[in-house]
Image (cartoon, rainbow, N blue to C red):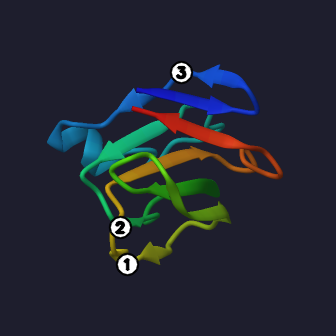
Amino acid sequence: MRLIIDNKEQNFYVCNSFKSRFFGLMGKVNIKDIYIFPKCNSIHTFFMKENIDVVMLDKSGNVLKVYNNLQPWKVILPKKNVYFVIELPKNTLKEKELQFVL
């Protein structure tokens, strides 16, 4: 998997374990990391300390939905055809192009 934002490849963590999926970016401050959640079609931002950007993609890596600057204590209910969720630092995607290559 590769994540490219504005033609620059990004480092990221894949959250496959129960612990990494449960905690994600919860409780973190000065977020700089990018987390990818496979087999995920919804998220919450409970116990988050900062806003984040969220991208929802299908199995082929096509962007289906983008949430910019999502605030803590929000819920994104399950979305049809979503297979990957990417959590990024706030304003990472503001007017930028994102590519997700499997």
Tag 3 residue: 11
For the residues labelled 1 and 2, say whether their Cβ atoms are less than 8 Å apart: yes
**Three-letter residue code for mark 1:** Leu
Q: Is residue 91 left or right of residue 101?
A: right
Compared with 79, 31 (above or below) is above
Query: Is 67 placed above or below 48 here?
Result: below
How many marks the image carries: the answer is 3
Q: Label 2 vs label 3: CA separation? A: 22 Å
- Secondary structure type for disc 3: loop
Q: What residue do we see at 47% from left, 47% from top?
A: 86
Q: Secondary structure at mark 1?
A: loop
Indicate which disc, 1 or 2, sits on the residue closer to the N terminus: 2
Q: Earlier in the sequence, mark 2 or mark 3?
A: 3
**Tag of residue 42:** 2
Q: Quadrant of the N terminus?
A: top left
The residue indicated by pointer 1 is 77
For marks 1 and 3 on the same chain, the one whose residue lies earlier in the sequence: 3
Q: Is residue 25 left or right of residue 99?
A: left
User: Residue 94: x and y, percent?
Assistant: 80, 52
Q: Is residue 49 visible?
A: no
